[in-house]
Amino acid sequence: MYRTNSCGELRAANQGQTVTLAGWVQKVRALGAMAFIDLRDRYGITQIVVDENSPRELVELAEKLGREFVLQVEGTVRERSSKNPKMPTGDIEILASKITVLNSSQTPPFTIEENSDGGDELRMHYRYLDLRRAPLQRNMILRHKLAQSVRRYLDAQNFLEIETPYLIKSTPEGARDFIVPSRMNPGQFYALPQSPQTFKQLLMVSGYDRYFQIVRCFRDEDLRADRQPEFTQIDCEMAFVERDDVLNTFEGMARAMFSEVLGKELDAKPFPHMSYDDAMKYYGCDKPDIRFGMRIAEFSADLKGSGFPPFDGAEYVGAICAPGAAVYTRKQLDELTNWVKRPQIGATGLIYARVEADGTLKSSVDKFFDQEMLQKWAAATEAKAGDLILVIAGTKKMAQNALCQLRLEVGEQLGLRTKGEFAPLWVVDFPLVEWDEESGRYFAMHHPFTSPKLDDMNRFMTEEPRDVKANAYDFVVNGVEVGGGSIRIHDSEVQSRMFEVLGFSKEEAEEQFGFLLGAFKYGAPPHGGIAFGMDRFCAIFGGDDSIRDYIAFPKNNSGRDMMIDSPSVVADEQLKELALKIDQ
Ligand code: ASP
C-alpha cells in the first residue's frame, strides 16, 4: 500500500497514529539536525518533520531532496509545537521514521504554489505542472462536480446520454469547420461537428424523446477569453415540447447546478424573460447583465435639440445614467472617452452631464444645450443629484454596442457587478434571420433548423422573412451567454423553405441536408432543445472571465497547444496516403 492517508486529511484527533503518506515535495527546510518537508497531493499539504528521534540517514536524505520530488513517508502523527491556523492540517505534523524517494524531479520552471511566478506561456508549455497547482485543481474539481450535477439532474428527468459521431459533415452554427481528410476516400473530407445539432434532431425522429450529451464541439473561429477551438457543450434535445417546457426543464437544471455545486439557491422564481427587442433597446445587446440597472434611454427628436453636429446627423442618440458618478474627475472622463473611441467600439466621442447637488446640470456641451434641455436628459435617464449622464451618438449599431460596453465598464467601476451574485435571464423572441448587406443574403440568426414563431409561420412561408421572429431562446447569466436553443422545424416543407430563404438552391439543400429533409418525411415529432457552454458555466461558477483554466489542456490564443506543440507539419508519406499536397 503506497499510502494510508492523503496529505489533506490528518488532524489533531489522529495523534499517535502511524501513517504512510505519498506526494510531492512543495518545500524543504533542512536545518542541520532537523528538516521540515511540506508534502503535497491534491487533497492538501502536510508537514513532515525529521529530527533527532528519526533515523540519522533521514537527515542526510532530507538535504538532498528538491522541489517536486515524489516521496513516500512513514511516520507518526504528532501535535505541532507551533501550529499553523491557515492550514487545515496545521495542528499536526508527521515525525518521519522512513522516507522513500519514489522519483526525483528537475527543478520546476515555476513555483507550484497558489500564486505561481510563471508567466502564461511558460505555464501553458508545462501545463502538467501548472495543473498541480491548487487553483487549477480547484477548477478541475468544480468542473467535475458540475458535470456530475448535470448528469444527476437529467438522468432523474429521464434524459438518455447518447453519443454522436465526431467525423461528420458540416453542421452550420455560423463558424468555419475543422476538416479531416479521409484516407479511404481520397479527395474527400469529414467535418468535425460545430455541434451535434442535426444528430440530436435525428434522435428525436428515432423516438429518444429526451437526449443529452456532454460533448466536444469544434469551431474554427478567432479566439477570445471565452472561446476555444474545441469546447464542451451540455447538449440537450426533447420531443413533444413547447418552448416553455424546455425553459422550465433547464431552469430546473440550472437551479440544481447552482444549489449542488455552489450551495446557492437562486432567488428569481421563475427566471425572468426578456424579449430580444427589449434587450437591445434597454441594454444595447442580446445578453444583458441584469445584476444592475443603468438602462439605456434612447433620445427622441425633442431630446436631441439641434445645432449640435454630432446629434444632428446621428441615426441614434442614447444615454445611460451612472448612479453617484458625478464625482468622476476630468481625467476619469477623458479615459472613458478614449475607451469608447477604441476601434473595437468605434464611438466618435462621449458626451457627459453631471447632476449637481442642487439639481442643475453641468455638461461637456453646455454651449449647445440650455438647462431646460439638459433637464429633459435627466428626466429621460432618471438621473438624480450626484449622478452622471453619459451620451453616445452615431449609427444605431455602433451606439447601442458602445452604450452596452460602457454600461458594463462603468457598472464594474462602480462596483455594481457584484461577485457571487447571479442574475439568470432568458432572452426570447430573437429575429429568425439577419440580412447581410455585404453578401446580399439572409443568415440564420441561430441556425437553419430553428422554427419561426407559430404566429409568423404564414408570413415566413409566403413573404420576405425580414421581421419574422424565431422560437429561439438564450440563457444568460451576469451578461454571459451560457446557453442557447430553439424549438425546431420538424416539417420538411418548412425546412426546405428555410434553406430557400438562406439562399440554398434545391440541389444544394438536398446535397448537404438531404438526410434531415428525408428524415422529416418519416414522422418527425415536434421537438426543441438547447445547448449550454460547459466551459463558460464553469468560469461563471468560479468567478472568472476566462474559460481557459477550467479546461485541463486548452489552446492558446493562436489555437496552439503549447505543450504538445500542435498543430504541426506531417510527414510527406502521410500526406501522400491522404492524396494531399501542400501548396506553399
Ligand atoms: N446547436 C446549438 C448551438 O450550438 C444549440 C441548440 O440549438 O440546441 O448553439
Image (tube, rainbow, N blue to C red):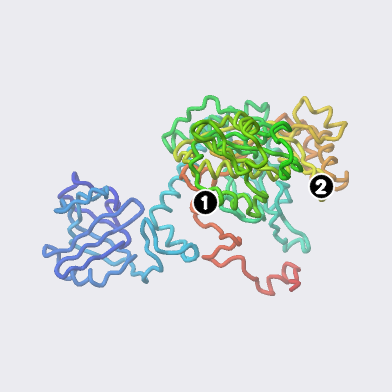
Residue 537: numbered disc: none
Q: Is mark 2 within 8 Å of ligand 1?
A: no
The amino acid type found where label 2 is placed reads: Glu
- The residue at 54%/57% (across/down) is 554
Depicted 94 relative to depicted 533: above or below: below
Label 2 vs label 1: CA separation?
39 Å
The answer to whether one can see residue 472 in this image is: no
Locate the C terminus by quadrant.
bottom right
Q: Residue 560, position in %: x, y?
A: 58, 63
- The residue at 55%/33% (across/down) is 360
- The residue at 74%/62% (across/down) is 184
Depicted 492 relative to depicted 165: above or below: above
Q: Nearer the viewer, residue 131 or 197?
A: 131
Q: Which residue is mark 2?
A: 437
248 displayed left or right of 528: left
Q: Residue 344, position in %: x, y?
A: 65, 53
The answer to whether one can see residue 358 in this image is: yes
The amino acid type found where label 1 is placed reads: Lys
Labels 2 and 1: the sequence-earlier one: 1
Secondary element type, mark 1: helix
Q: How many marks?
A: 2
Q: Nearer the viewer, residue 167 or 452?
A: 452
Task: Kindly indicate the quadrant of the structure image that contains residue 104.
Answer: bottom left
Q: Which residue is mark 1?
A: 331
Secondary element type, mark 2: loop
Q: Residue 485, position in %: x, y?
A: 66, 37
Label 2 neighbour load within 10 Å: few <14, some 14-19, many 20+: few
540 displayed left or right of 228: left
Q: Residue 566, position in %: x, y?
A: 59, 65
